[in-house]
Image: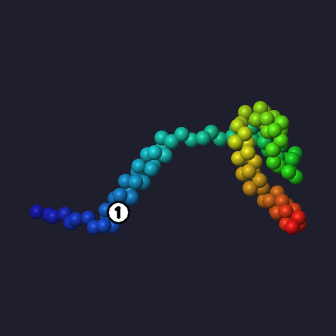
Amino acid sequence: KVRKRPQDATEKQLSADRNQTAAREEKSHTRARGKGIKPEQKEILQTWFDENYEHPYPNDETEMQRLMDESGLTKKRILNWFRKRRETDLDWRKKHKRESSSLN
């Protein structure tokens, strides 16, 4: 008879890790994904950003409502898009940083 050796702690941990990974992958396929912003919607937001480059914060309620109406996006989605856009625009960030440091 061939005896199987008992699994040691590392083999048990590896097995448990594989099971957890498989469970996560299974869940990730069933999770609903958010819808991205359509090119037409992005164009509306980008145009507003470019026109208001010195202060790209659509805080005025009438401007926000206009953007919501034109793009069909929620206020939260619009604010998130502008936040991410400002974060990724290196030229804008450099200029903004320079202006804020000159105020101090």
Residue occupying the far left of the picture: 1
For image coordinates 82% across by 49% down, the residue present is 56
Q: Where is residue 72 in the image (x, y as percent from the top left)?
A: 73, 33
Res 42 quadrant in image: top right
Query: Does residue 91 appear in the picture of this structure?
Result: no
User: Disc 1 on helix, strand or loop?
Assistant: helix
Colour setup of the view: rainbow
Point out the image quarter for the N terminus.
bottom left
83, 46: nearer the viewer: 83
| CA neighbours of label 1 inside 10 A, class few (<14), some (14 to 19), many (20+) | few
Q: Is residue 53 above or below residue 70?
A: below
Q: Where is residue 25 in the image (x, y as percent from the top left)?
A: 45, 49
Q: Where is residue 39 in the image (x, y as percent from the top left)?
A: 73, 39
In the shown orientation, is residue 32 left or right of residue 72? left
Q: Which amino acid does label 1 sit on?
A: Gln
Q: Position of residue 53 (x, y in %)?
A: 86, 50
Q: Mark 1 points at which residue?
A: 13
Point out the image quarter for the C terminus.
bottom right
59, 22: nearer the viewer: 59
Q: In this view, does 46 lie above or below 21?
A: above
For image coordinates 40% across by 54% down, the residue present is 20
For image coordinates 81% across by 44% down, the residue present is 59
